[in-house]
Image: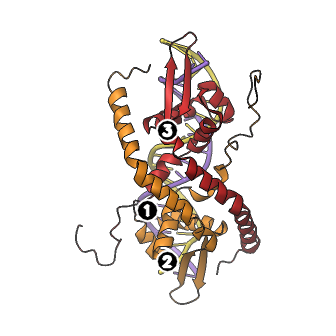
Chain colours: A red, B orange, C purple, D yellow
Amino acid sequence: MTSTTPASRVDVDPEQACPIAPVVDIVFSRWTTPILWALHEYGRQRFVELDRRLGTITPKVLTQRLRQLERDGLVVRTYHPEVPPRVEYEISDLGRSLAPLFATLAEWSTANLDKVDRARDDYDARERPGARRL
Amino acid sequence: MTSTTPASRVDVDPEQACPIAPVVDIVFSRWTTPILWALHEYGRQRFVELDRRLGTITPKVLTQRLRQLERDGLVVRTYHPEVPPRVEYEISDLGRSLAPLFATLAEWSTANLDKVDRARDDYDARERPGARRL
DNA sequence: CCGTATCCTTGATGATACTG
DNA sequence: CAGTATCATCAAGGATACGG
């Protein structure tokens, strides 16, 4: 390879052609938005509070995601050496800097989510029966 | 917030406590951003062009994602009954309405991605060896 | 309380081959 | 060309139990 491939793939490093791909991985991987939202809305919280607030998440997965967010600098973890132990999580400044982004997202949501719903209804009505694709 | 809830889960319908969760599912599920970006940047394209441009995606998955995006009204599919068949995909008005969102995302990226990298380096340097969590 | 360790299930993806 | 069908793989997530 490394030659002038005539009619093959374009000069893209796979999946990286999209410049926002890295941010998407960081901010929108599974459970990250609910966690960040919870921390942003309700402030510093302990592990169990978060666990309960997120409803269906398991402690294992919550730990994984919190570690990831801590490593990425979006969340700050504070350990209080007491008995019983107490750990608190809060959103970092970097994490807070995502607020306008989330706001934009929420605006788009209120403005367009119903359009998506209608598009789905239309599609399902059209493509339902024999479902001949033309 | 609800004070002193005895000892159970808060009044959240699971995973739905985050108001932007639905949009995230629609816009940021796997491969959707690269696809939308490619359609937005390079305009109307045929199936193979997209396939090649996205680099590593397989036709099967590309079809799945395109169907989803078409159903959600973010992408428009046009079938030209010729031999050989020709199908073109383009971004819809609804899809285009995501542009400012993507712009915000790109801005955050250029402004803060290096901070994430440094946070990761710091974390890895701290938590590397015996990795005692305190 | 705050997790970790283990096992297991499942949904997503890759590979390959084949139609209209 | 534009997919679909089928099979194999695989890692993320859930359930459960236990430890500091």
What chain is tagged by disc 3?
A
If you read the primary sequence from the N terminus, does the residue marked by circle 1 or circle 3 appear first? 1
The location of residue B126, given as percent across then percent down, is 35, 27
Residue under label 1, please give it. Answer: A18
Residue under label 2, please give it. Answer: B43
Q: Marks 1/3: CA distance?
A: 26 Å
| Quadrant where the N terminus of chain A is found in the figure | bottom left
Residue under label 3, please give it. Answer: A93
The amino acid type of the residue labelled 3 equals Asp
Name the outermost residue toward the bottom: B82
The amino acid type of the residue labelled 1 equals Cys
Q: Marks 1/2: CA distance?
A: 14 Å
Closer to the camera in the image, A108 or A120: A108
The location of residue B104, given as percent across then percent down, is 51, 58
Q: Label 3 neighbourhood size at 10 Å, few (<14), some (14-19), many (20+)?
A: few
The amino acid type of the residue labelled 2 equals Gly
In this view of the protein, can residue B25 be seen by the observer? no
What chain is tagged by disc 2?
B
Question: Residue at coordinates 53% horizontally, 47% vertically from top-left?
Answer: A98
Looking at the image, residue B89 sits to the left or right of residue A51; the answer is left
Q: Is residue B4 above or below residue B39?
A: above
Q: Label 3's element?
A: helix
Q: Is residue B71 above or below residue A90?
A: below
What chain is tagged by disc 1?
A
Q: Label 1's element?
A: loop
Which mark is on residue B69?
none
